[in-house]
Amino acid sequence: MKIVCIQVDVQFGNPEKNMEHIEKKIREAVRLYKPDSIVLPELWDTGYDLTRLDEISDENGEKAKKWLSSLAKEFGINLIGGSVAFRKGNDVYNTMLSFDRNGSHIGTYSKAHLITLMEEEKYIAPGKESGIFTVDGILSSAAICYDIRFPEWIRMPFIKGAKVLFVPAQWPIQRQTHWRALLIARAIENQCYVVACNRVGSDPNNTFAGQSMIIDPWGDIVAEASVSEEEILTADISPELVDEVRAKVPVFNDRRIDLY
Ligand SMILES: O=C(O)CCC(=O)C(=O)O
C-alpha cells in the first residue's frame, strides 16, 4: 500500500481556505505518486482556534464528510481524514473521518485524551470509542496527537490484530523530541506501522514541529518530512513485514495476561 501524508500549514479558523489548500495538495499527491491512501493532519479545518469553535465547527461533520467522500471517490483513494472540529449538539469533538476508494465512510474516531496543557478540554469533548477500522483489508487504528502519550489506549486495537496506526497531529516544536521518541516507541511496542501526519507553521499560540513520519514495525523511520516546510511524504507499507516482525519477536504471545 502506497501511503501519502499531506504535511501542510493550517490557516487559523479558516475552514474554507484550508479545504481549498488541501484539495490542491491532494491533487498534486495523486498526480505525483498515485497513492492508495492519503492521510491529513489534526484539525486541518479550524486549526486550534478553540474560542471560535461555536461559530466555525462543522455540524455533524457534514461538510467534511461530503468533501472527503467526494475526493476519495474522484481519485479512487482511501482518505484518512486527519481530524475536524465536529459539532454534535452542544459539544464539539476532535474527530477523524475516513473514507474508502468508493467514497464510503469506513471510520470515525474522536480524540480521547485532550491536552489540558493547551486547555483543549475547555472547548472539546473527549471521545470514548476505540479508533479501530479497516483500510483495503488491513486492520488499522487511529490516535490523535496527545493520544500517543497513552500507550494503554493505543495498545488495545493491536491486541486485536491491527497492523497500522494513523496519527494526525498538531504537535508543537517545544516537545519535538517527544514526538519522535513516542512515535518510534509506539511502532516498536505494537510491532506496527505508524503513519504520523503533523502540520507546519504557527498559530497565535504555537509553532508546530512538522516531521511527519512513516515508521515500520521494526521501529525504523522509512520516510520523514522536514520541520518547517509543507511536504508530500510518501512510502510503501507492507502488512507482511508486520507478520515477520511479530513472528521474530513474539511480544504479543509473550504478554503476561495472567498478571495484567
Ligand atoms: O503531547 C504534546 O506534547 C502535544 C499534544 C498536542 O499538541 C495535541 O494533542 O494537540
Image (cartoon, helix red, strand yellow):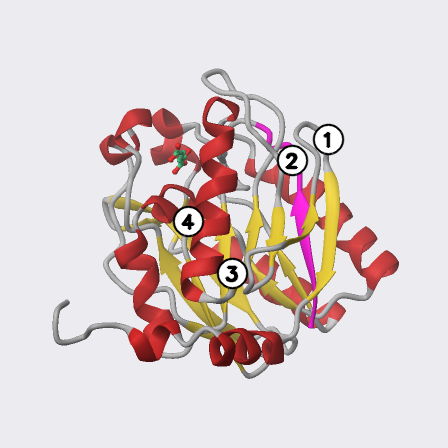
Question: Which residue corresponds to the image point at 14% horizontal and 67% vertical from the top-left?
Answer: 260
How many other residues sit within 10 Å of disc 4, few (<14), some (14-19) or many (≥20)?
many
* Residue at which label 1 appears: 229
Rounded to the nearest angstrom, the CA distance separating label 1 from label 3 is 28 Å
Evaluate whether residue 149 shows in this view: yes
Which quadrant of the figure has residue 17?
A: top right
* Tag 4 near tag 3, CB within 8 Å: no
**Mark closest to the chain's N terminus, 2 or 4:** 2
**Mark closest to the chain's N terminus, 3 or 2:** 2
Of labels 1 and 3, the one closer to you:
1
The dot on residue 65 is: 3
Question: Residue 195: x percent and y percent?
Answer: 57, 56
Question: Which residue corresponds to the image point at 37% horizontal and 34% vertical from the top-left?
Answer: 53
Report the amino acid beneath label 4: Ile
Rounded to the nearest angstrom, the CA distance separating label 2 from label 4 is 23 Å
Residue at disc 1, secondary structure: loop
**Mark closest to the chain's N terminus, 1 or 4:** 4
Specify start and end residues of the magenta stretch as a single range: 1-11
* Residue at which label 4 appears: 144
Residue nearest the viewer, comparing 107 with 63: 107
Q: Is residue 2 magenta?
A: yes
Depicted 73 relative to depicted 55: above or below: below
For label 4, being within 8 Å of ligand 1 is answered yes
Of labels 4 and 3, the one closer to you:
4
